[in-house]
Image (cartoon, grey):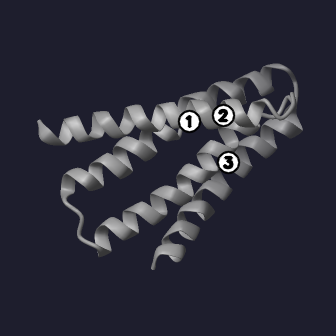
Amino acid sequence: MKSLLFIFLGGGTGSVLRYLLTAAICRQGTTLFPWGTFMVNMLGCILIGIFYTLTSRIHFSNEIRLLITIGLCGGFTTFSTFSNESLQLLKAGLYPMFSAYVIGSVILGIAGVMLGIWISE
């Protein structure tokens, strides 16, 4: 039960941070490309790589590890929004933008986790 509380607290914090960062990015200008979600997800990938490596190496408690990785990073990043925005680009016939968003998100997301691990090793 204690673990669930830590995940809950991290998830709520991550969700609020996602909203604030996405809103700040979107205020910079309007574009059809979903930069807010893209940037949040890329940053989240880097952070989970860093946090997962550091919490393993420094031997944080399991609760803190859950709070940071599953809670904070899980609440911060968003696959459902990514999927919805991808579908909207597809429905609008913006095929090159759709392809760039989907392929870029997956490849750069994996690279971001690798970068986070590399940074923290």
Query: Who comes first in sequence, dot 1 or dot 3?
Result: 1
Who's the residue at 39% across and 31% down the image?
12
Question: Mark 3 belongs to which amino acid?
Answer: Ser
Category of crowding for the residue at label 2, using alpha-carbon neighbours closer than 10 angstroms: few (below 14), some (14–19), many (at least 20): some
Q: Find residue 22 and name its label.
A: 2
Q: Nearer the viewer, mark 1 or mark 3?
A: 1
Who's the residue at 60% across and 28% down the image?
81
Q: Find residue 116 and name its label.
A: none
Residue at which label 1 appears: 18
Category of crowding for the residue at label 1, using alpha-carbon neighbours closer than 10 angstroms: few (below 14), some (14–19), many (at least 20): many
Determine which quarter of the picture holds residue 24. Answer: top right
Mark 2–mark 3 distance (CA, rounded to whole Å): 16 Å
Give SS at disc 1.
helix
Residue at which label 3 appears: 105
Residue most extreme to the left: 1
> Residue 85: image x %, image y %?
70, 27
Determine which quarter of the picture holds residue 1. Answer: top left
The C terminus lies in quadrant? bottom left
> Residue 74: image x %, image y %?
43, 41
Query: Who comes first in sequence, dot 2 or dot 3?
Result: 2
Mark 2–mark 1 distance (CA, rounded to whole Å): 6 Å
Who's the residue at 60% across and 61% down the image?
112
Question: Mark 2 belongs to which amino acid?
Answer: Thr
Looking at the image, residue 32 sits to the left or right of residue 101; the answer is right
Determine which quarter of the picture holds residue 75. Answer: top left
Looking at the image, residue 109 sits to the left or right of residue 25; the answer is left
Asked if the residues shown at circle 2 and circle 1 are in contact, with their CB atoms under 8 angstroms apart, the answer is yes
